[in-house]
Image: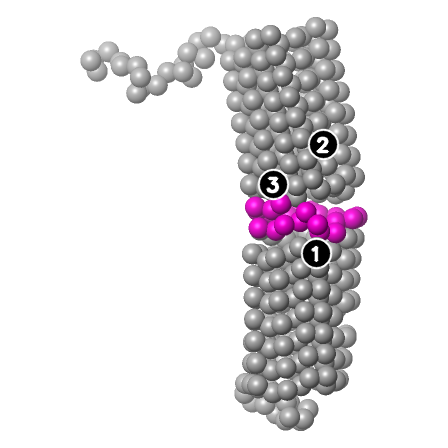
Amino acid sequence: MDVEDIRTRVEHLSVIEGENFERRTFSDLDLTEGQFARCDFTRSVFSNCVFKKTTFAKCNLSGAVFQSCVFDETLFMMCVLEYARFAGESLKGVTFMKCPAAEADLSNCALDTVAFMCCDLGKAKFAGVNYERGALLESDMPGIDFSGARIFRAMMNKADLRAAGLANAHLEQILICDADLTGRDLSNRTFKQCTLVDGALEGINFSGSDIFQTSLVNCNARGGCFDGAKGQFAMMAGSDLTGASFKNASMPNAVFANATVEGADFSHTNLPMAVFDHANCKKTNWDSATLVHADFSNADCTSSNFGNATFDSTKFHGTKMENASEFGARGSKVDTDTERLVAQLYSPRKVMLWGEV
């Protein structure tokens, strides 16, 4: 099939199926609303082509090269894209669904509302991309390279990022569910307003990073390092931070409600108005920490060290303080309100009111 035949079929909205275009070169071709099924484009070159609302279904595009093309609402469904080269292209509203795309090259691309669903992105190159409003869902990403990438307002799930290239990556307003970042070094990075849910983050290193308004929800971040991090309004609710280090971090208004910070080190940490309500704070080190207006209501601070800490109306309502040390601490505390504690413990299932006997 020659180029004129392709143009005619596309203009008449006819499906082009089963054609062999291997190693062909296509230049200045408008494929708007074109439909290709089971076609072989192996190592083909597309130069200055338009793919607006174009659909590729079960096509082989392995090793294909795209140069100065227009991608707008393009659909790649169950296509082979291994080693395909999109480097430097702009893609808008493009969807890749169930595509094997190992080692595909999308480096330095501008990706706007681009989704990868159930794709194999092993060792794919996303270095230097500007990726906004995207989605990486149910996709395999071993060894994917996001180095130098700027990813903004995106979401991903079930991502194994232990071997991903993340050097100099800028991540902001990203939702990441069920990801594995065990032992990753994300020190001195921008990781602002991100949300990680049910993540494996054991031993992660966020030291010196900007984690403003970032949330770790029900994550395992045992032994993590947050030394010197900037974490205003960070939320660690329900996460396991056993043995983590927050030395010299600045985390005003951070929320650790229902979290486990047993054995953690908060020495010299700035925590004004931080919330540790119902948190497990056993054997935690708060030496020289700033805890002005912080709230430890109903927390377990057994055997913790508050030496040289700074308080100011810091709440310790219903807090377990057995064997805790406050040597050298200064400032005011709000201790347990007995009547309020009794009211909290009251349950109509346990206590009968008069007339209910």
The spot of residue 275 in percent (x, y) is 60, 24
Magenta-span inclusion, residue 90:
no
The mark found on residue 144 in the picture is 1
Against 290, is 6 above or below?
below
Amino acid on which the number 1 mark rests in the picture: Ile
The spot of residue 216 in percent (x, y) is 61, 37
Secondary structure type for disc 1: loop
Against 26, is 139 above or below?
above
Depth order, front residue of 23/255: 23
Residue denoted by label 2: 225
Kindly identify the residue that appears in the image at 52 percent across and 10 percent down.
336
Q: Is residue 334 visible?
A: no
Kindly identify the residue that appears in the image at 65 percent across and 61 percent down.
121
The mark found on residue 244 in the picture is none
Q: Is residue 242 visible?
A: yes
Magenta-span inclusion, residue 178:
yes
In the picture provided, is 113 more to the left or to the right than 169? Answer: left
Q: CA gap, disc 1 to disc 3?
A: 18 Å
Q: Earlier in the sequence, mark 2 or mark 3?
A: 3
The spot of residue 46 in percent (x, y) is 73, 79
Secondary structure type for disc 3: loop
Give the crowd class for mark 1: few <14, some 14-19, many >=20 residues within 10 Å. Answer: many
Amino acid on which the number 3 mark rests in the picture: Ala
Residue numbers of the magenta segment: 158-180
Residue denoted by label 3: 200
The spot of residue 33 in percent (x, y) is 59, 80
Secondary structure type for disc 2: loop
Q: Earlier in the sequence, mark 1 or mark 3?
A: 1
Kindly identify the residue that appears in the image at 71 percent across and 27 percent down.
246
Q: CA gap, disc 1 to disc 2?
A: 24 Å
Amino acid on which the number 2 mark rests in the picture: Cys
